[in-house]
Amino acid sequence: MAFLSLDALTLKFLGAAAPAVRDVSLALEPGDAVALMGTSGSGKTALLRLVAGLEQPTSGTITLDGRVVAGPDTFVPPEQRPLRRVLHDAELESGLTVRDVVLSVQPKGEGLAHARGLLALFQLEDLESRTCGTLSRGQRQRVLLARALASGTKLLVLDEPFAGIDAGLRATILGELRRVLKARGSAVLFATHDVADALAFADRLVLLRAGTVEQQGTPESVYESPRSAFAAYFLGGTNLLPGSAFGRVARTALGNLPLNSDARGEVMLSLRPEALRLVPDTDGVAVGGALRAEVLERAFRGAHVDLTVSCAGMALVVRTAPSAPFREGGRARLEVAGRADVLEETSGPAR
Ligand SMILES: Nc1ncnc2c1ncn2[C@@H]1O[C@H](COP(=O)(O)OP(=O)(O)OP(=O)(O)O)[C@@H](O)[C@H]1O
């Protein structure tokens, strides 16, 4: 049985034109890490606040650890719900030391060694004697997470949990935290704007759009089979192009493209930047079927470079290695090296 389940949950704020959360259903098993994603205003925080008990649903039900905590005739207040939350309004007692904050919420019987283990997980050992009022934003955030975890809770509800923590530290903390939560069987429901964090940390992504679930699934399934242009763009950018499908192939301006699924008729396709390849066009002679491209823009992204190229009357993004010899204004040949995804909608981008 799911540890947390939301059934047809809707929240409409008084006087609002549309619900902030609309008919959302999802379930978390013990140990599940679920990321809520979506553009600003899509309902992520509202959904977390509903689960935490800070908002009362307009309709629908929340069941937590086998007990209905919000429903037509039920509302269990936040402090009686078996969860820990770190939302934007989270506060720390400024006069307490980092160590005492963690010790104060630990279950009875757990000693200093346990608290220090948690502080180490969030790389706070050197700060344990500091008072919370003297900490930086990222340090405070880590103390909030350590405090939430210290209670041994079976459900964490977190809003932008890794914001303000620098990239190197973040990667270590994400890995360690995931390991601890899995070992304990604690579930986590968190909202994030950071695609990389969500892909690395979550077992499942829930993509919200205007309060409703646009798509949910494992990070791999949402990335590899986005249902809409919105989902495709949201998880790291894509190229959209119309086509005419006949089975596993579609006729497009780039030629006949292989598809990830069967389709017939007019379709909208998503072709990830890594499914395209550029090869140098040194002699300017077009080889049979090759597509000529001109590099419009080069964006260095650390581990890779995104090149915007003009090809077949379209602007397309191609992902290459930073060492690839393409510069703005240069010419190249474009090859399709991967399969295209068939989107459920046939219109263009809707971001
Ligand atoms: N107390 C409130 N009263 C009325 N409307 C609200 C209230 N709180 C949020 N909203 C509205 O509900 C919608 C969802 O807001 P929410 O804060 O959940 O978005 P979000 O996805 O968390 O956004 P962000 O990524 O910017 O934090 C928005 O349109 C917002 O303006």
Image: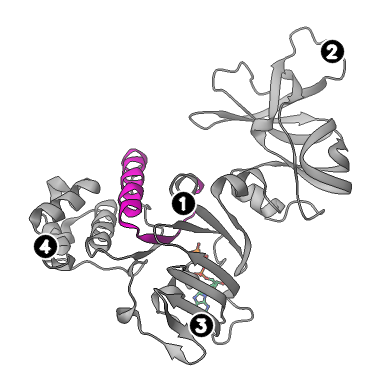
Q: Position of residue 111 (x, y in %)?
A: 9, 59
Crowdedness near tag 1: few (<14), some (14–19) or many (≥20) residues, C-alpha within 10 Å: many
- The answer to whether residue 206 of the structure is visible from this angle is yes
Which region is colored magenta?
A: 167-195
Q: Position of residue 219 (x, y in %)?
A: 55, 48
Query: Depth check: 48 or 110 in front?
Result: 110
Please give the label number shown on residue 202: 1
Kind of residue at badge 1:
Ala
Kind of residue at badge 4:
Asp
Query: Depth check: 143 or 132 in front?
Result: 143
Colour mode? one colour
| Residue hosting label 4 | 100
Kind of residue at badge 3:
Pro
Q: Position of residue 24 (x, y in %)?
A: 58, 71
| Residue hosting label 2 | 287
Q: Earlier in the sequence, mark 4 or mark 2?
A: 4
Q: Earlier in the sequence, mark 3 or mark 2?
A: 3
Mark 1 against mark 2, which lies toward the viewer? 1
Q: Is residue 8 above or below residue 93?
A: below
Say which residue appears at 14% left-offset and 67% top-offset: 104
Q: Is residue 29 left or right of residue 231?
A: left
Crowdedness near tag 4: few (<14), some (14–19) or many (≥20) residues, C-alpha within 10 Å: many
Disc 4, SS: helix
Q: Is residue 212 left or right of residue 170?
A: right
Say which residue appears at 54% left-offset and 55% top-offset: 205
Crowdedness near tag 3: few (<14), some (14–19) or many (≥20) residues, C-alpha within 10 Å: many
